[in-house]
């Protein structure tokens, strides 16, 4: 193969490329535009063999303090058939090195491990054993292109992806009996409806439910402007669904949707919605909603060892495992940068000052990381 890489500047053309390749919603044009509001920039790359498109990647670039220049990141991409993945990644990395000179390229593809799907609740030891088996040819190709697995994960690779091409009864049968009862009960509840949010007042209520859910579950949330940016920049690819009791939203799930995949960004429920179990009905309604659009996969977006993940696990008898985070160094300065990488990635979520602190003093950053690990172990214990 003799591959060429060019930048795409047309939103409609780009999204059609992503959809035609079965790409993920985080690879759509609007997601890159959203991130561009928050100190990233996006370069949408098309990889061709002659006149044939064999791959594509929306690359997000984040400026770093000198001498590191920038970090390149591909969320849930690139798009490429298994037999082309290594070559496409090699071509993308070469283009980035020449055009942007980043310190490294990080990818978190929407590609499943060869031994996925998994039985629900599979142990970490079993996952490690799966990874220790001889890799599939396309995994060897990724390694040959200079990429190595990284533990500095942004998007959680362990997730639940439901095949929504099946009929509704088949999907329902995979739910636990209690979950099926809660779904059916919520659909029969009086004065309750499910649908898509279009009203600004309802959006304000939902954002408050989101903050309330975050306080209850102890996780951080973006500000309201960020959420409105998703709505405005993703357009019809942003689909905010809710359950109402009367005129009051009491549960929501916020999806971004490509041609093949619906991806849960956020979800939440009020105390009243919890009492009525409307979060159960809403989740099943969301799967029906995207199924009607011809979507094939419903991705619940990450499984951890927490109550929210326990709720998600009730909707299938399996789990899925993506290949996770892979890095390719693109600069001789990468070893120094890698020392601070965990805190740099954390800092990217907190802002530029935190990033500068990590990259200017990698040793101190590593010490801070070790201290955080010790504190977490103390808290957990």
Image (spheres, rainbow, N blue to C red):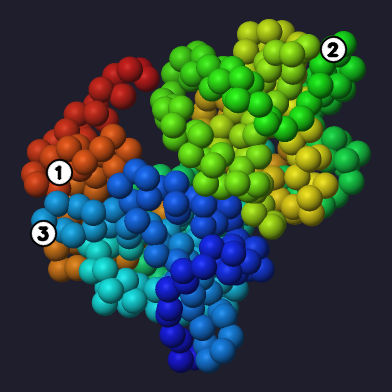
Q: Which image quarter: residue 120?
A: top right
- Local crowd size for mark 3, using a 10 Å CA cut-off: few (<14), some (14–19), many (≥20): few
Residue found 55% across the figure and 66% down from its top: 14
Q: Quarter of the image for the C terminus: give it.
A: top left
Residue 153 appears in view: no
Q: Element type at marker 3? A: loop
Residue found 29% across the figure and 53% down from its top: 62
Q: Could you tell me residue 97's position as x and y percent?
A: 27, 73
Do the residues bearing badges 3 and 2 touch, measured as CB atoms within 8 Å?
no
Residue found 65% across the figure and 34% down from its top: 240
For marks 1 and 2 on the same chain, the one whose residue lies earlier in the sequence: 2
Q: Could you tell me residue 180's position as x and y percent?
A: 83, 26
Label 3 vs label 2, nearer the camera = 2
Residue 297 left/right relative to 26: right
Q: In the image, is residue 30 above or below residue 169?
A: below
Q: Which residue is mark 1?
A: 356
Q: In the image, is residue 356 above or below residue 334?
A: above
Q: Could you tell me residue 257's position as x and y percent?
A: 64, 48
Q: Which residue is mark 2?
A: 191
- Local crowd size for mark 1, using a 10 Å CA cut-off: few (<14), some (14–19), many (≥20): some
Q: Which residue is mark 3?
A: 67
Cα distance between the residues tagged 1 and 3: 11 Å
């Amino acid at each position: 193969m003799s591959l060429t890489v060019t930048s795409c500047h047309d939103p409609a053309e780009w999204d059609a490329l992503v959809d035609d390749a079965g790409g993920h919603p985080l690879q759509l044009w609007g997601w890159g535009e959203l991130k561009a509001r928050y100190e990233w920039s996006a370069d949408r790359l098309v990889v061709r063999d002659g006149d044939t498109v064999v791959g594509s990647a929306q690359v997000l670039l984040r400026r770093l303090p000198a001498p590191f220049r920038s970090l390149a990141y591909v969320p849930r991409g690139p798009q490429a058939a298994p037999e082309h993945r290594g070559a496409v990644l090699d071509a993308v990395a070469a283009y980035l090195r020449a055009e942007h000179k980043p310190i490294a390229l990080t990818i978190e593809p929407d590609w499943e491990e060869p031994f996925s799907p998994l039985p629900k609740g599979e142990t970490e030891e079993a996952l490690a054993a799966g990874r220790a088996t001889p890799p599939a040819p396309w995994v060897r190709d990724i390694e040959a292109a200079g990429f190595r697995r990284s533990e500095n994960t942004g998007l959680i690779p362990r997730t639940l992806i439901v095949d929504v091409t099946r009929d509704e009864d088949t999907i329902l049968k995979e739910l636990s009996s209690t979950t099926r009862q809660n779904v059916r009960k919520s659909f029969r509840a009086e004065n309750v409806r499910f649908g898509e949010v279009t009203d600004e007042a309802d959006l304000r209520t939902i954002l408050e439910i989101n903050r309330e859910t975050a306080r209850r579950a102890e996780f951080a949330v973006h500000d309201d402007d960020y959420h409105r940016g998703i709505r405005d920049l993703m357009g019809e690819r942003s689909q905010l669904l809710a359950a109402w009791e009367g005129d009051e939203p009491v549960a929501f799930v916020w999806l971004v949707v490509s041609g093949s995949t619906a991806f849960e960004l956020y979800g939440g429920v009020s105390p009243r919605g919890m009492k009525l179990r409307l979060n159960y009905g809403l989740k099943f309604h969301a799967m029906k909603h995207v199924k009607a659009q011809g979507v094939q996969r419903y991705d619940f977006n990450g499984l951890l060892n927490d109550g929210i993940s326990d709720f998600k696990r009730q909707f299938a008898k399996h789990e899925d495992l993506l290949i996770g985070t892979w890095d390719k160094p693109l600069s001789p300065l990468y070893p120094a940068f890698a020392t601070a990488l965990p805190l740099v990635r954390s800092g990217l979520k907190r802002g530029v000052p935190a990033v500068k602190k990590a990259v200017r003093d990698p040793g101190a950053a590593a010490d801070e990381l070790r201290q955080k690990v010790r504190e977490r172990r103390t808290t957990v214990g």
